[in-house]
Amino acid sequence: MSKVMVVTSGKGGVGKTTSSASLGAALAQAGQNVVVVDFDVGLRNLDLVMGAERRVVFDLVNVVQGDAKLPQALIRDKRVETLYLLPASQTRDKDALTEEGVGRVIGELRERFDWIVCDSPAGIEKGALLAMRFADLAVVVTNPEVSSVRDSDRIIGMLDSKTQRAEDGGRLEKHLLLTRYDAARAARGEMMKVDDILEILAIPLLGIVSESPDVLSASNVGSPVTLHNPTSAAGRAYIDAARRLLGENIVVDTPPERQSLMRRLFGRKAAVA
Amino acid sequence: MPHVTLRGRTFMALVVTPAFPMATWFAAFDQQMRGAAGFFVDRPIVANLAETLEAGGPEAVFIVLEGLEARELRLIGVEGVDPALLAGTRWERMPKTLHGRAQTLEAWAETSPVAAGGERSPAPVTSSNAPSLLIDRPVRSGQSVLFEDGDVTIIGPVSSGAEVIAGGSIHIYGSLRGRAIAGLRTGAAARIFCRRLEAELVGVDRLYRTAEHWGEALHGRPVQVMSDRGALRLTALD
């Protein structure tokens, strides 16, 4: 049974693309057949984060409009053989996508893959709505700050009303992925606390990914952090999140404050030791 | 300085009733707009000009309408004046009377700006006998619940950026972080109850308050809001 999973947030820059790539890679590393679809037409990034930017020929818009066949546009990852990418077009805009076209492509992808991960663009307009339209479940990416939390709340409302599943009277499964979390700053009251965010958004927590240079350096070399550095805190957080998506029951641990305190006091040495 | 009263009316329109002396009234109105700019943004306004006409004659009516227009308010209707008076002016086409109060929830679902542009609000559970609306899920940011026929009960939070507007009282078994406006139909008898007050704005009948008007002391506490002899009163319930 294939699952269509939208990774969304409302707000930009919170880590949707990084999370799409990392979760997609982690699911594929667990043996699932995965395709990650970039819905950010006009501002495509997923190909860079996944290190496939030099292999893009056809894209989502070509397939939606019938100019290319799906297999022509799918790019197979060089590191994990069950991982594929369907890139967005950089030269077009969101109006190039139609609901019927996207529905048809999602239907075709459902026949080939276990997981279809849809990387949503920011905002609440057409692109974001089409990315969530056919989803079975949603990962809401949120940073621990008020503006991101409110935008996520807005997106959750839309997931409950504007998706096909919601319109058919069903309920969409929603998970919260907290990214760029900094325990030390949260302890000092400079960031929202996990409990407060969960209280406001009232959806189950899929994972907490700490703010980490590992994520940035992985993006810069075009490799999801779960492949580039699977033993890093961020890598493990995404791998655990993917296992939870696969039904495993793993407790989410909040990054401990003490470690950050040690790091603050002793710099890199403590982190290495 | 007179207190500018605003009365919630059909849908989310507000009724303003300018009073003499005009300069003083507009000054008070401007102050109120500055204090709660978000309250007026895109909110349809109906002007009741009966008093203006009586005290200042036809000329005053046009001065007031121009004054409201200059403030970039969405003036959608005029009441309290003879339609003939506005004939031949740019306000001619504005509806003179609004029959919003008879609207039912079904009618609202089809015509409200929320249904047209925003999301559907959580599926309401209505009973034909008791005029009340029960919503057993969170009201999310950007959603708007309007129920003119009676009380609204919400089991779950009302998020920042969400609003609940009721003909009667509003009961929220959760945190109120957005707006709640009660008493469109029952007026001053309506109350708002919430388990945690973190609201942006509360209003009963013709009175409203924004968060900065009530102290930290009430923040996060269970609170009821009522209209008490012409003033809005917030009291802790614990």
Image (cartoon, coloured by chain):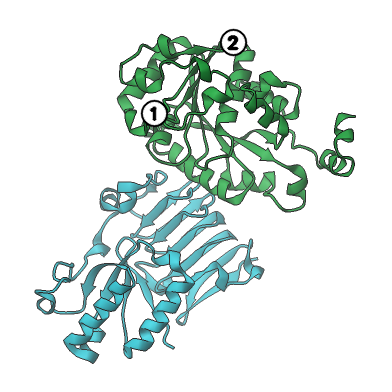
Chain colours: A green, B cyan
Give the amino acid at mark 2: Lys
State which quadrant residue B17 falls in.
bottom left
Of residues A33 and A92, the one nearer the viewer is A92
Query: Circle 1 sits on which residue?
Result: A91
On screen, residue A224 above or below A203: above
Query: Circle 2 sits on which residue?
Result: A78
Q: Secondary structure at mark 2?
A: loop
Q: Residue at x 72, y 22 (%)?
A: A229
Marked residue chain, label 1:
A
State which quadrant residue A170 falls in.
top left
On screen, residue B206 above or below A262: below
Q: Which mark is residue B24?
A: none
Crowding at label 2, few (<14), some or many (≥20) Cα neighbours within 10 Å? few
Of residues A43 and B122, the one nearer the viewer is A43
Whole-percent x, y for residue A45 in the image: 52, 28
State which quadrant residue B56 falls in.
bottom left
Crowding at label 1, few (<14), some or many (≥20) Cα neighbours within 10 Å? few
Q: Secondary structure at mark 1?
A: loop
Q: Earlier in the sequence, mark 1 or mark 2?
A: 2
Instruction: Give me the C-alpha separation between circle 1 and circle 2.
Output: 25 Å
Most extreme residue toward the front, as rendered?
A: A54
B6 sits left or right of A83 in the view: left
A141 sits left or right of A102 in the view: right
